[in-house]
Image (tube, rainbow, N blue to C red):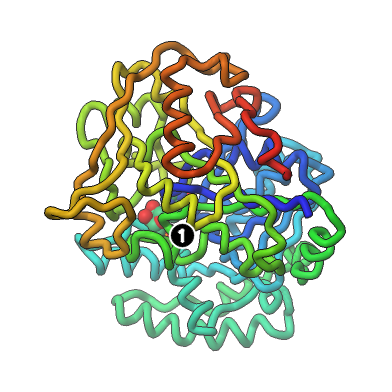
Amino acid sequence: MPTLVIVGAQWGDEAKGKLVDALGSEAHMVVRYSGGNNAGHTVIAGGKEFKFHLVPAGILHPNVHSILGGGMVICPKGLLEELARTREQQSDLGKLTISSAAHVVFPYHRLLDSLEEEARGANKIGTTSRGIGPAYTDKVARTGIRMGEFVDPEVFPQRLAEVLEVKNKMLAMFGREPLNYDELLAEYTAYADAIRPMVADIEHVVQDAVYSGEKVLFEGAQGTFLDLDSGTYPYVTSSHPTAGGATLGTGIGPRAIDGALGVCKAYTTRVGSGPFPTELLDDVGEWIRQHGKEYGTTTGRGRRCGWLDLVVLRHSARLNSLSGLVVTRLDILSGFEEVKVCTGYKLGDQVLHHVPQSAKDFAAVEPIYQTLPGWQGDLRGCRRLEDLPIEARNYLDLMAEMTGTPVAIVSVGPDREETIIVRRDLIWG
Ligand code: IMP
């Protein structure tokens, strides 16, 4: 069973899009398993830049079947716009199927996301305002509307009426005008009509692909430390970006996963609030942001930047049962005389080698750094490990040693070709 999970090993934005595009072209099926249009993947293919928020990057390959899994929350308007935009850039797209179990994001979710953030004041999470938290809240409260219900004209009007009654009461509590049922029904019925042909039960489809030995890629969104349970709660997203999330809503169990590649930057970034021990609030952080163009694909916000945190990465390796690391943006760190990596934390008079679960403790830790010689020159032309400066190779060796996970792939630039395959055997087994 050649099945592979691609997971963000830090706080998201690890440049997974390029990898999913490259490996997706070798797969029969690409299944996205969590999140919604809070995610943003940039893929550069055939000289064009594609931006995806919902659609798996596998869509660019006409022979690949792309699936939006049941663990996702999907904004139909955003999805249709994204598909139209992608079709304008490339006419021959692969087949797309949407799980009937995925939940639908409605305008009241987006409104409530913003209103709740506003109400949190200084304690805001820094969400993407895409309605993700409120849509997952409805799912857990068992009041959400699933894709299967949304595209069923005998069910949707009644479900919307029930839910909207409650949501309008909530909006009134925030001093907002109610949403008009007839307008919302008309607008969303049109989206449902457009989406209906793509909606289906997908669990058995994914199972059949997996058990007939096809190559199936499970595409994670966001990153490990944004996971609802294992991330830096409450500064997390409302879903499960970890490798375990790939089994939720896609129809497979843990033994059907052969490998998990953890994508990590050679440094660390984070968007939104929450603990980030190695954050650099100085010129070095600003240099990384400018040099690495560290601005969000979804919101355009400047990302917080810092040194590589190997405590975070080792936890991620264990949490996701990583079989290999994919180190991205190694080229961006080029030019420093010295680089630092965090190998432990000081918390009061204690030394920690693990990530504290309490946000209060995690916010209070001080990083313990190891300083390494930096490397110089443009790495974008490197295609083999041996082409890299020895200092960069030593850096990769330390990452592998500290995480107990071999480096499978190194990315040295945004283009597909700007990639070093270190261990092909770690990719599809
Ligand atoms: P939400 O997912 O919009 O509810 O946002 C919750 C937290 O996750 C915020 O800190 C966001 O900045 C962060 N977040 C959500 N999606 C992504 C992503 O794709 N990349 C990086 N951070 C994200």
> Which residue is labeled 1 in the image?
130
Height in image: 342 above or below 73? above
Residue 353: horizontal and vertical position, in percent? 31, 51
User: Quick check: can you spot residue 53?
Assistant: yes
Q: Residue at x 42, y 78 (%)?
A: 178
Q: Residue at x 72, y 53 (%)?
A: 3
The one nearer the camera, 307 or 77, is 307
* Left or right: 87 in relation to 188: right
User: Quick check: can you spot residue 190?
Assistant: no
Disc 1: residue Cβ within 8 A of ligand 1's nearest atom: yes
Kindly identify the amino acid type of the residue bearing the numbered disc 1: Arg
Q: Quadrant of the N terminus?
A: bottom right
* Left or right: 423 in relation to 348: right
| Residue located farthest toward the right when viewing the structure as drawn | 212
Residue 139: horizontal and vertical position, in percent? 53, 77
How packed is label 1: few (under 14 Cα within 10 Å), some, or many (20 or more)? Answer: many
Q: Quadrant of residue 161?
A: bottom right
| Residue located farthest toward the left when viewing the structure as drawn | 349
Give the quarter the ligand 1 occupies. Answer: bottom left
The one nearer the camera, 134 or 312, is 312
Height in image: 27 above or below 250? above
Residue 55: horizontal and vertical position, in percent? 65, 51
Height in image: 292 above or below 163? above
Q: Quadrant of the C terminus?
A: top right
* Left or right: 84 in relation to 145: right
The one nearer the camera, 126 or 171, is 126
| Residue located farthest toward the top when viewing the structure as drawn | 377
